[in-house]
Amino acid sequence: MDNIEQIKINTVVNGEKVEAFVEPRLSLVDFLRNELELTGSHVGCEHGVCGACSIQVDGSVVRGCLMLASQADGADVISIEGASDAGIVADLQKAFHERNALQCGFCTPGMLLTSSELLDQKKNPTRAEIREYLSGNYCRCTGYEAIIDAVETVAIDRAGSSHNGKS
C-alpha cells in the first residue's frame, strides 16, 4: 500500500518556506503537528466545532481540522508557535496568565489566535462582542469569564496605549 497519491505543496509556515508532499486527505492541523512538529494547535472534535485546531491562513483564522494541507499550497500559515514567537499574541498571553484564563491549556492556542483576530478587526469590543466572537472556541475548564476578562483587558490596554501616543 505504498502507492498512496501524494500532492506537492509549497507554503510559508511561520515565515519559513515549506515544500512537502502530502496525502490528499491530510488535514492542515495534522500536517503541522505530525510533519512539522508544530504541536500547539490541537485536534479536538475533528468537525470544526471546538476551535482547538485554529490556525491563521492568509490572515484569517481557520479550522485546521477542516482545511486540507493541500489547500494551503501557496498560502501563508501562522501557527500559535509562529504568533507567539513573533510577539503577535504576547499581550494576550500575559493577560490570560494574569487573569487565570487558562487551566489545562488545550483550548488556549485557538482562543489566543481568535482573540488576536478579533482585536485586529475591532479595537474596542464589548464583552458581548468578545463572547460572540469566541463562541466557536470551547473551553471545558475556565467557564469563559476569565477568558473574556483577559481579552477585554488587552483591548483596554491597547486602546490606552494608542491614545497615550497622541497629544
Image (spheres, rainbow, N blue to C red):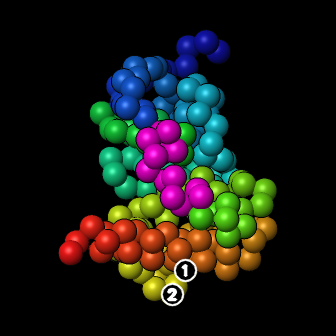
Give the residue at mark 1. 131
- Of residues 117 and 89, the one drawn nearer to the viewer in this rendering: 89
Q: Residue 151: horizontal and vertical position, in percent?
A: 53, 71
Please state which amino acid type lies under the numbered disc 1: Arg
Give the residue furthest to the top.
2
In the figure, is residue 29 to the left or right of 19?
right
Q: Is residue 102 magenta?
A: no
**Quadrant of the image containing the C terminus:** bottom left
Quadrant assignment, res 98: bottom right
Give the camera-side residue of 64 and 80. 80
Residue 63 seen by the camera = no
Residue at point 33%, 38% (across, down): 75
Horizontally, residue 12 falls left or right of residue 151, namely: left
What secondary structure is marked by label 1?
Answer: helix
Q: Position of residue 94 (x, y in %)?
A: 59, 58
Asked if disc 1 and disc 2 are in contact, CB closer than 8 Å, the reply is yes
Height in image: 135 above or below 96?
below
Q: Secondary structure at mark 2?
A: helix
Rounded to the nearest angstrom, the CA distance separating label 1 from label 2 is 5 Å
Mark 2 closeness class: few <14, some 14–19, many ≥20 residues within 10 Å = few
| Residue 15 in sight | yes
Q: Which stretch appears magenta?
A: 82-94
Residue 41, given in percent of the width and then of the height, sits at 60, 46
| The N terminus lies in quadrant | top right
Extreme-front residue of the structure? 167
- Tell me where residue 90 appears, x and y as whole percent: 51, 52
* Res 128 label: 2
Q: Is residue 84 magenta?
A: yes
Q: Which amino acid is tagged 2?
A: Ala
